Amino acid sequence: MNVQQSFARRGFLRGALATAVLAPMGGALASCASGGGTTAGPTGTVSDTNPFGVPDNSTVDAVIFKGGYGIDYVDFAGSIFNKNHQGSTAKINPSTAISTELQPRFAGGNPPDLVDNSGAQSIGISTILDQLEDLQPVVDAKNLEGTPIKDTLYEGVLAPGTFNGKLVAINYVLTLFGVWYSASLFEANGWTPPKTWDEAYELGEKAKAKGKYLFLWGKEAASYYLELALSSAIKEGGDEVRVALENLKEDSWKHPALTKVFEALDKHVKAGHFKPGGSGTAFTAAQAQWSNGQEALLYPSGSWIENEMKDQTKADFKMTGAPVPTPSSSPKMPYEALHSGGGEPFIVPSQAKNKAGGKEILRIMLSKDAAANFAKTKLAPTVVKDTVPADGFGSTALVSQTKMLDAAGKNVFNWQFLDLYGMNKDVLVVWNAFLDGKSNAANLANDMQKMSDKIRNDSSIKKVEIK
């Protein structure tokens, strides 16, 4: 997997659905007559076990983005579909260029029955909203175990796929963010993950005494520290911090909570708690210095980190996640609050020949067995709760993710503005300079504000109001 593909599957830097909102489409699709028309498709007997009326001897055409998660998890659901519907066949087709391959099919009125609209070439959701099925009936339906799907999902996971009150995409993979560490290393030294930035500084000094660093970074992933900073500031200052940033408000990067976090990070840089040279190091090499060389104690990342580094992690590392620290011990949101969001958005086109079959595959994917299969094989949770056993299939990282989500409860937040406005390229320049010690907290805030102001004042850029 190359760097672009790797970042494409992550909920923060290249959130497929968030990027898709503003992604332009080719003329053929944009100009096709849509008008919300649908095709009836084949119908069968409707029941709790067949809520969409899928007939026997039917075929489902699914096109699935083949990125970091592959397509075998949909193959798994497809095999169940074939068993449950006599004589039926689920054709699971891989793609690495969703929009390029599917634009002609949408324009021609023969789109697939199910699409994983992910990757760098995802389809612009805003351009096909009236060509997509309302997926609320899917979450209202019972899963294979007989429980309404809506009662089995984590808090807030449907919001990113809901536009103008219509649920048009269901994000399948749940990504959560935090700081990751070696539980075995921490246990051996009597260390605990820091809950405040003061505690983090103390830990940095202890790391230095052991000939280690507190943090390190790689040039393509310097923006992971922006994610860390935003999560910390939103927890400290409350949702008003996120809303102002989302809507590109003046002086939004000067909020006191952000100032405190930037100053805390600046203090770490000046104290030598960051391993030097990150701006000249590939991000996977830097991560290996942490996961295999144990040169640093903490690494901010999303929950993909274990799977990404599984071949470059020290034996008995016991990779574990923890919430990010906050400037004070009394933040507006609890320490346990998390940045978390969905990825791999699945859609069902209204003009599909067998949209009932597409919905049925999605219903199967949202059932316990299929969701547990994904977690076990990909070492990442889905949006379905209670599908990871207590031992996390042997993964300490997966166990910690479940504990973090349970502890956070409803205190979960996400943001879209960085992906919506394509800020990552500029962000990397600014944050590499900051982490290198070539900038400071005040300059960092000014640089980020300039980026935001430039977008806000550019009338050619479509703005999205976010609440």
Image (cartoon, rainbow, N blue to C red):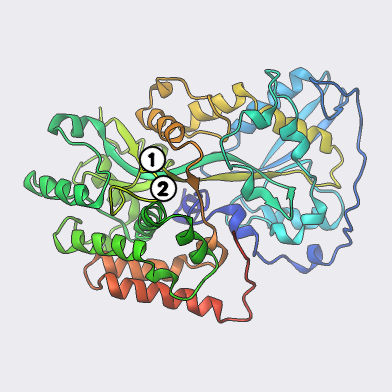
Asked which quadrant contains residue 34, the reply is bottom right
Q: Which mark is residue 23?
A: none
What residue lies at 19% left-to-right and 62% top-to-bottom? Answer: 267
Q: Secondary structure at mark 1?
A: loop
Residue 138 placement: quadrant:
top right
Q: Nearer the viewer, residue 317 or 103?
A: 317
Image quadrant where one finds the C terminus: bottom right
Image coords of residue 285 (percent x, y):
29, 50
Given the image, on which type of amino acid does mark 2 rest?
Answer: Met
Residue 369 seen? yes
Is 406 situated above or below 257?
above
Q: Is residue 212 visible?
A: no
Which mark identifies residue 336?
Answer: 1
* Residue positioned 87% across, 41% down in the render: 353
Q: Position of residue 445 (x, y in %)?
A: 35, 72
Residue 84 relative to residue 174: left or right: right
Figure check: 81 above or below 217 = above
At label 1, the amino acid type is: Glu
Residue topped by disc 2: 333
Query: How many marks overall?
Result: 2
Left or right: residue 289 compared with residue 346 = left
- Nearer to the camera, 260 or 1: 260
Q: Is residue 420 left or right of residue 444?
A: right
1 or 2: mark nearer the eye: 2
Query: In the current view of this chain or complex, which residue is farthest to the left?
Result: 209
395 or 220: which is nearer to us? 395
Please rate how many residues cluster around mark 1, counting C-alpha atoms within 10 Å: few if below 14, some from 14 to 19, many from 20. some
Q: Residues within 10 Å of mark 2 (few under 14, many from 20)?
A: many
The image position of residue 390, as x and y in percent, is: 42, 20
Picture quadrant of residue 41? top right
Q: CA distance from mark 1 to mark 2?
A: 8 Å
